[in-house]
C-alpha cells in the first residue's frame, strides 16, 4: 500500500511539474506569437496613353530593412517616440534609388489579357513628406485587354514583415475604383475587355510567335525532312501539337514552371537530335515518343510569351485556346507549303543523277539544321556559352 501511495504521489508531482512547465512556456511564447509585424502598401494606377502609370507608396522602415538602408527603426521601436532625421533617410534612399525601383518594379506586375506589361526605364524614387517612399513607374502595355494587377511587395518570404495589405486605386479605361489585396488575394483584374474582339489578336499573336521563332520553325522542318508519307506528317504533327498544347496551358497558368535557362537550350538540342536522327535512323519507330517529348519542351517555350497573374477564368482559358489556335494555323501553313514541294521534288527525281542530287541536298539541309541547333544549344547553355 505504501508503494502504491508513493507511486501515485510521484505521478501526481510529475504531472503537476509538466503542467507548470507547459504553462510557463505558453505564457512566455504567447507575446512573441501574438506580435505580428504588419505593413501597408498603396498603389495608384492611371491610364497613360497606350501604357499605365503607377505610383507606389511603401513604408520606409520596411524597405530600409529589406535593402539595408540607413535610418531604419528596429521592428520593436515606437515610431511615435523614435525619430530619425529625414535627411539621413533621403540621402540613403537617393544612393539606393535603383535598388528600390528594381524591387518595386519586379514585385508589381501588370498585364493586359495574357500579355505582360514592361516597366520602362527612368523610375522616380523619392521620400514623400509623409515619410513614405514613393516609387513612380511607367509600364508599356498592349493596347487592349483587361488590366490585371499583381502585387508581391513585402511578402512574408522577404523576412521583414508577416502581413501586407495593399490598397489599389485605379483609373483605367475610363473606369475608376479601388480594391484591397492581401496574403490571400494578391491580384485583381480591372477594366473591361470584349472576348470576341480579343480572338483575332490572340490568334495572330500565336501565329507570329511560331513564325518569328526560328527554332520552332527549324524543328518542324527537321520533322518534315524525315517524313516519307503524308501519314508520317499527320502522326508527328499530331504528337507535337498535343504535347505542346498541354505544357503551354499548364505553364501559362502557373501549374508547371521550368526556368528558361533549362528550356531554351533543350529546345535547341531537340532540333539537332531530330535532324541527326533523320540521317542515322530514318525508319526509327521511336520517332513519335521522341516528338511528343520534345513537344512538351516547345510548349514551355511558347508559354514564355504569356503571363497569367490573375485568377483563372473562362476569358483566360479562351485567350490561351486562341493563342494555341494561332500556333496550329501557322504550323499547318508551314506543312502545307513545304511538304507538298518536298514530295513533288522526290517524285520528279527519277534519274540516278537527280536522285543522287536530291539525296545530297537532303543530307546538306539536314546537317545545316542540326548545326544550327547545336550552335544555339551552346549559345543558350549557361555552362557552355
Image (cartoon, helix red, strand yellow):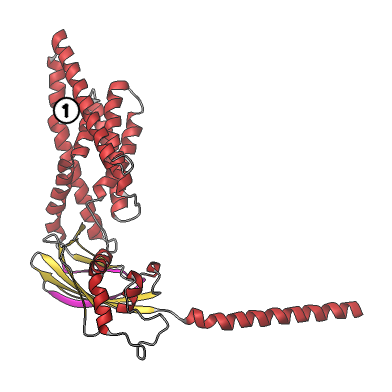
Is residue 332 something one can see in this rendering? yes
Q: Is residue 94 above or below residue 213?
A: below
In the rendered image, the residue lying farthest to the top is 352
Q: Circle 1 is placed at which residue position? A: 339
Kindly identify the residue that appears in the image at 36 percent across and 88 percent down: 82
Q: Residue furthest right?
A: 1
Check disc 1 and report its element: helix, strand or loop.
helix
Count of numbered circles on the image: 1
**Is residue 188 highlighted in magenta?**
yes
Residue 141's x, y, as percent?
15, 61
Q: What's the magenta bit mostly, secondary-structure-wise?
A: strand
Residue 213 percent across, percent down from the top left: 18, 42
**Residue 150, percent from left and from top:** 27, 67
Residue 40 part of the magenta segment: no
Few, some or many C-alpha atoms within 10 Å of disc 1 (few <14, some 14-19, many ≥20)?
some
Quarter of the figure with the N terminus: bottom right
Residue 205 rendering spot, x and y as whole percentages: 15, 50
Q: Residue at x 53, y 82 (%)?
A: 30
- Looking at the image, residue 345 sits to the left or right of residue 64; the answer is left
Q: Which quadrant: the C terminus? A: top left
In this rendering, the answer to whether 269 lies above or below 365 is below
Query: Which residue is painted at 24% across and 34% down in the image?
Result: 375
- Residue 157 occupies quadrant: bottom left
Quadrant assignment, res 314: bottom left
- Name the residue rendered at 37%, 68% in the picture: 158
Observer able to see residue 244: no
Instruction: Work out whether residue 327 or residue 303 is closer to the camera in this orientation and state it.
Output: 303
Please report the bounds of the magenta region as a residue range.
Answer: 175-192
Amino acid at each position: 500500500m505504501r508503494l502504491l501511495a508513493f507511486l501515485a504521489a510521484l505521478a501526481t508531482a510529475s504531472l503537476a511539474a509538466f503542467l507548470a512547465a507547459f504553462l510557463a512556456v505558453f505564457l512566455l511564447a504567447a507575446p512573441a506569437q501574438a506580435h505580428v509585424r504588419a505593413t501597408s502598401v498603396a498603389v495608384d494606377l492611371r491610364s497613360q496613353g497606350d501604357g499605365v502609370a503607377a505610383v507606389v507608396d511603401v513604408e520606409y522602415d520596411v524597405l530600409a530593412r529589406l535593402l539595408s538602408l540607413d535610418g531604419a527603426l528596429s521592428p520593436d521601436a515606437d515610431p511615435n517616440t523614435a525619430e530619425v532625421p529625414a535627411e539621413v533617410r533621403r540621402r540613403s534612399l537617393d544612393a539606393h534609388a535603383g535598388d528600390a525601383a528594381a524591387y518595386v518594379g519586379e514585385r508589381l506586375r501588370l498585364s493586359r489579357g495574357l500579355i505582360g506589361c514592361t516597366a520602362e526605364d527612368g523610375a522616380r524614387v523619392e521620400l514623400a513628406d509623409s515619410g513614405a517612399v514613393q516609387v513612380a513607374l511607367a509600364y508599356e502595355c498592349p493596347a487592349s485587354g483587361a488590366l490585371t494587377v499583381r502585387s508581391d511587395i513585402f511578402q512574408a518570404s522577404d523576412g521583414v514583415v508577416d502581413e501586407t495589405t495593399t490598397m489599389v486605386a485605379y483609373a483605367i479605361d475610363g473606369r475608376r475604383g479601388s480594391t484591397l489585396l492581401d496574403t490571400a488575394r494578391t491580384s485583381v483584374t480591372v477594366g473591361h475587355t470584349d472576348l470576341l474582339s480579343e480572338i483575332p489578336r490572340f490568334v495572330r499573336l500565336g501565329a507570329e510567335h511560331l513564325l518569328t521563332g526560328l527554332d520552332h520553325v527549324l524543328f518542324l522542318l527537321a520533322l518534315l525532312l524525315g517524313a516519307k508519307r503524308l501519314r508520317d506528317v499527320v502522326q508527328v504533327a499530331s504528337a507535337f501539337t498535343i504535347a505542346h498544347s498541354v505544357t503551354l496551358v499548364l505553364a501559362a497558368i502557373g501549374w508547371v514552371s521550368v526556368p528558361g535557362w533549362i528550356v531554351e537550350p533543350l529546345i535547341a538540342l531537340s532540333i539537332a537530335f531530330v535532324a541527326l536522327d533523320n540521317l542515322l535512323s530514318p525508319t526509327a519507330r521511336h520517332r513519335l515518343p521522341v516528338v511528343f517529348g520534345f513537344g512538351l519542351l516547345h510548349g514551355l517555350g511558347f508559354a514564355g510569351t504569356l503571363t497569367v497573374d490573375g485568377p483563372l477564368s473562362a476569358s483566360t482559358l479562351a485567350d490561351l485556346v486562341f493563342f494555341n489556335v494561332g500556333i496550329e494555323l501557322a504550323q499547318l501553313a508551314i506543312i502545307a507549303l513545304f511538304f507538298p514541294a518536298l514530295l513533288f521534288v522526290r517524285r520528279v527525281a527519277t534519274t540516278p543523277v537527280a536522285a543522287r542530287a536530291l539525296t545530297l541536298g537532303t543530307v546538306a539541309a539536314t546537317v545545316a539544321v542540326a548545326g544550327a541547333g547545336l550552335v544555339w544549344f551552346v549559345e543558350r547553355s549557361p555552362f557552355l556559352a
